[in-house]
Amino acid sequence: MPKDDPRQAFVRLAEARTNKILKALDLLGNLSNRSNYSYTEDDIRKIFRTIGERTANVSAKFQAIGRAKKRDLFRL
């Protein structure tokens, strides 16, 4: 099997990984159903602050602003 050229590899992986993130966000949104789950406003702020920080960190890598640190897994 021939190896992808760098552009083909990027497109293939970027599409798959972005779709995986979008699916995970949809699943996260399912937790908003208060009849099934209990959470505080602080929990929600922490979740979205962490997602926002990680998104900014990855965006910086693409903008060559600097190398972003790899972070530990999220915990409430």
Image (cartoon, rainbow, N blue to C red):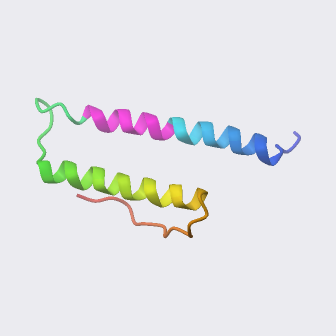
Query: In the rendering, at what x and y percent does residue 71 appear?
Result: 43, 66
Q: Is residue 12 magenta?
A: no
Q: Residue at x 10, y 29 (%)?
A: 35
Q: Quadrant of residue 14?
A: top right
Q: Is residue 34 above or below residue 65?
A: above
Q: Residue at x 89, y 41 (%)?
A: 2
Query: In the rendering, at what x and y percent does residue 9 appear?
Result: 74, 44
Q: Quadrant of residue 46?
A: bottom left
Query: In the rendering, at what x and y percent does residue 13 appear?
Result: 65, 42
The answer to whether 74 appears left or right of 1 in the picture is left
Question: Bounds of the magenta span?
Answer: 20-30
Q: Residue at x 17, y 30 (%)?
A: 33
Q: Quick one: 61 or 47, which is closer to the camera?
A: 61
Q: Is residue 16 above or below residue 42?
A: above
Q: Is residue 40 above or below residue 54?
A: above
User: Which quarter of the rendering shows the C terminus?
Assistant: bottom left
Magenta span dominant secondary structure: helix
Q: Residue at x 15, y 37 (%)?
A: 37
